[in-house]
Image (cartoon, rainbow, N blue to C red):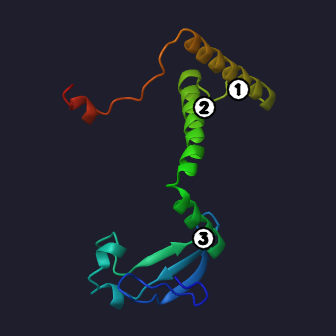
Amino acid sequence: MDWDAKTVTCPNGKTSRQWRDAFSIRDAPIIRIAFSPTDCRPCPARPQCISSNRAIKREITLRPRAEHEAIQQARAARGTPEWRERYAARNGIEGTISHTVHTAGLRQSRYRGLAKTQLQHQLTAAAINLARLDAWTAERPLAHTRTSHLAALRPAG
């Protein structure tokens, strides 16, 4: 990808024919890149580039350069132990939110008005904390994730 020349080279060595600035359906700035159908139609590497059988050319949509590079750096860091450690906290938070939604109906407020809704959230959080504290003191084991249908078919042993 050559940002200065505004071109992209495909795995087979062909260069893009169109690079234009546009906006997504959410009004975010994007870049639309297109290759020539005459390059893509006979290309032996076409299945690597185009997932649709009906598509005759390769089209790529990217974010502006700064955003694209930030996304690429974040994706590269995803496999590191530091990233996994940070992400483990997010797993715990999402599990807590899911548990609260399913057990306490947190998705909808029982009351009208911001003050009453905030009070409901605070009381719900306190109730979840008390329930977890009770489970901890009673030494009840943590809940395990569900067993998939495929895993349930596996013989025990």
Q: Which mark is residue 36?
A: none
Where residue 53 appears, x then y in whole percent?
28, 72
C-alpha span from label 2 to label 3: 35 Å
Vertically, is 31 above or below 27?
Answer: below
C-alpha span from label 1 to label 3: 38 Å
Contact (Cβ within 8 Å) of mark 2 with mark 3: no
Q: Which residue is mark 2?
A: 107
Where residue 105 appears, x then y in whole percent?
58, 25
Q: Residue at x 58, y 26 (%)?
A: 100
Q: Which residue is mark 1?
A: 121
* Res 136 quadrant in image: top right
Going from the N terminus, do you reach mark 1 or mark 3 first?
3
Q: Amino acid at mark 2?
A: Arg
Q: Residue at x 26, y 82 (%)?
A: 44
Could you say whether the residue bearing mark 2 is in a helix, strand or loop? loop
C-alpha span from label 1 to label 2: 10 Å
